[in-house]
Each structure stands twice: as C-alpha cells, then as structure tokens.
Amino acid sequence: MLLRDSTVLVVDDEELYRRSLERILSRVGHKVLMARNGGDAINVVSSTPVDLVLCDMRMPGINGIELVRQLHEIQPDLPCIVVTGYGTPEDSVEALRAGAFWYLEKPFEQESLQVVRRLVAQAIEHGRLKSENRILQSQLRSRYKFESIVGKSGSLQQVLEIVEKVADTESTVLITGESGTGKELFARALHYNSRRAGRLLVTVNCGAIPEELLESELFGHVKGAFTNAIQSREGRFTVANGGTIFLDEIGDMSPNLQVKLLRVLQDRTFEPVGSSKTLKVDVRIIAATNQDLPRLIEEKRFREDLYYRLNVIPIEVPPLRERPEDIPLLVHHFLDVANQERGTRIETVSDEAMQTLVEYSWPGNVRELENLIERLVVLRPEGEITSDSLPSQFHEKHDPQGRTPRVPSTGLSFNEVVDNLESDLIMQALEQTHWNKNQAAQLLGLNRTTLLEKIKKKGLEKPAF
C-alpha cells in the first residue's frame, strides 16, 4: 500500500536523520517537510495540512511523547510514529499510551527500509480512515442523533436519506434486512430524530419471548388473569405511550397475536389480558424482520392485512457484502471502540488481512464483523492484525456466488468438503438466529430434531465470543 501525494513531517534535531528519512520517503512519492524541534513541528501542523508525523523521542525542549500529546490537541486524528536511538520497553509503552501510532528504533538498516515505508503507508491510511469516520459520525450525530451507524456506501446513504425523510412523521415503518445488518440502529435513528425523541423508545423482541407470555408482555394483564399473575402489570404498549414501540422479529409473532396487533395498528386500542377494559394509546409503531413476509403470507403464516398495515414505509437495510467499501471504516471503528474499552493497542490491519475482510461474504453482516474484531482484540491485545490472525473460514475460497468451493488442481476429499460445508451452513443459521434452534431449522428447511442430531453429531458449540 503506497499512499502517494501524502505529506509527512519529520521532526529530529539531527540533520543526518532528517535527511535520511526524507530520502526514504520521497522515493515512494511522499512530500516531506522537516522540523528541528517540537516547537517548529507545532507551528508546521498548525498552519499546513500534514498526514503523518515522524518525531524523535529525545529532543531539546519538547520531547517526542509530549509532542504527540500536543499535536493531537491540534489534530486528533493525526498519526504519529515515534523514533529513537535509545529505545527501552518502557519508552515504547509510554509512547503508545500517549497516542503514538507506532514506535521505531534507529538507525534504519537496509533491510528495515521496506518495513519503515510500509508502516508509514499504514499509519497514513489509518489516520485518513479515522478522520473520515469522525466526520461521518459527526454528521450522523447532528442529523440522526445516533452515532453508531458507520458507512459511506451509496446503498447505506440511500437508507439514511429515507430515515431522514420519514423520521419526523407518524407513519408506521417496516425495516427488513438480514440478521446482523443493524435494523435496530435504524429504528433508533427514526425515533431519536422524531418529535417523540423526548419520550421512550420501547423495544420488544417478538422471537425471544415465548408465545404464551408475549401477549401479556405487549398488552399487560390484570391480577388473577392467569396462574402466577399475583398483581396487575402494564404492557409495553402502555409504557411506550407518547413514544415509539419497536417490534423486532415481527415475523415470529403467532397468528393469534397478529390479529390483536392489527387492531392496535388500526385504532391504537387493546385490552390487557384478563380485562374487558379497552385502553387507548398514542404510540408510533416500527417493526423489523429478517424473514420474507410475502413468502410467509403465501404459507399462511403471516396475515396479509397486517403486512400492509406495517409496510406503510418500507426500509430495506443492505447486507454488508453489498457494501464492501464500508468494511475498512467499520473495521477501524470497531478497533477504536475495542481499544478504548479494553485498553488494548491494535491499530493496524495488514493489507492482505483487510483485503480478505473486504472479499469475505459476511453471512452474519455487521454483527459478525463486530464480534470478529472483539475476538481478535481479546486474543491479540497489541500489534497488527494479519491474515494469519483471521479464523479459518476467512481463508476458504468460494466461487463468485459463494455457492460451492473450488476444486484445486491437487484434488480434494469430496466427503470432507461436503461435511465442512454442511457444518458451515448450520453455524451460519445458528449465528443468524442467535442460536435459536427452531428458527435455524426453519432457515435451513430442516426438522428441528434433524438439526439437533446434526449439531450433536458434529459437536457444534456456541462460540465463547
């Protein structure tokens, strides 16, 4: 990765090393500025756009670590590499804690020049991604009052445009998309940019609550309505009165409850379980599903009239594989979050690893990417994420449609490949449904008992992360 037309500031009180770094970097297309001390460097950064700073650790006046801190006050996303001829482990830790991108020791031997050039390119790319991500999040904060939606792809921006247009209306919204695409984030964006933002957003996962309890959860119950109903309880619709209710996994709702929800959509009234008293609420309804509702209608598992009541404003969230340009931004966003929360120092991703992440199909979408970054940070709390750091499924080669593995010239074991593919499909279904085996069996078109037998036979277990 060579980022040409980048401006690098070299700060060193020794002219020999300033000139040496200038030659190393200018040969690969970087524009090099030079400063003799920290004060001069601060003046340069304050007046001139700079993409990277390489500064000596020990200089008269302001040392390298203090210079990094002061430069980040001027330009928070400016990557800095600290260079020293008197390196100690304590110095490297202190430099990284101060916010340095990396730490190098001089003199630079001939074999290390390529490493220096590559590290410089990675630092500049990381700084640009952080800056772009900061701008995008600032825009989302001001437009949507929600900062966790990261991406610059055209498909994502189209979704955000729809959110902006319909947020401050009372229209019912149906958000569709694969599991893990972030449908709840868009529901929150709709609520927090509406006139109801000062009231509650109440979330109900219709697929996570047993059918016999979901009606009481939604509409409440009176004392004595059923066994263990020792006192009356308000339902989620009552709690959300004046605000918004978000019905996630709406496709899992039973036909009986679908009828009652239809009435709420029509006139905003309902009766708590065990009561004959009709309650009226002022609530906006947002629903979401990862299922194909038109197909469920054909199978008589979802009411057509309810579908049209919900689908007033349809919003389809694109899967991550259809917006690969968002992956580098998301990778660095999740790395920054993990580093901040855990105090770890992983800030670089090798070119090969990033290319692998971009080309991966991401069946679990953004949630899968976030979980992967968390796993990598836990297992490797410092250094660089390389291709070797990635789990085995990222190294499997598939055809462009992702249907079947390629047959290598050396041949393969057919039974082993089929067995691995079956295991991969089962794991994908389990991850997409949060290990809900009933839903996973439906996704795979299997009987639940068949799926359970295969899980047991293959020894598949829920990952620790």
Image (cartoon, rainbow, N blue to C red):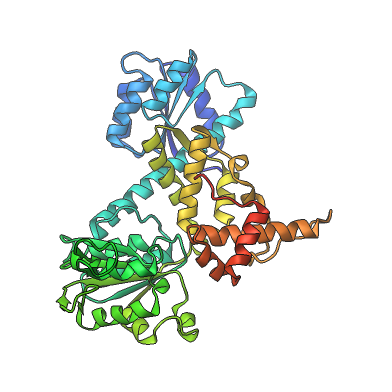
Above or below 15: residue 385: below
Residue at (59% x, 44% y) in the render: 390
Res 326 seen here: no
Q: Classify residue 239 by image quadrant.
A: bottom left
Left or right: 193 in relation to 130:
left
Q: How many marks?
A: 0
In the image, 397: left or right of 228? right
Q: Is residue 429 above or below residue 137?
A: below
Of 339 and 174, the residue lying toward us? 174
In the image, residue 293 sits, relative to residue 186, either above or below, namely: below
Quadrant in which residue 51 is drawn: top left
Residue 445 at x, y percent in the picture:
59, 72
Relative image position of residue 21 (x, y in whole percent):
51, 26
Above or below: residue 287 compared with residue 425: below
Q: Position of residue 465 (x, y in %)?
A: 49, 45
- Observer-nearest residue: 115 or 385? 385
Quarter of the rendering occupied by the N terminus: top right
Residue at left offset 39%, top offset 73%: 253
Front residue of 36 and 136 = 136
In front of the other: 48 or 187: 187
At horizontal 26% and vertical 72% (from top left) the residue drawn is 285
**Residue at x 65% of width, y 25% of height:** 111
Q: Where's residue 9, x and y in %? A: 41, 31
* Left or right, residue 284 beside residue 388: left
Residue 150, can we see it? yes
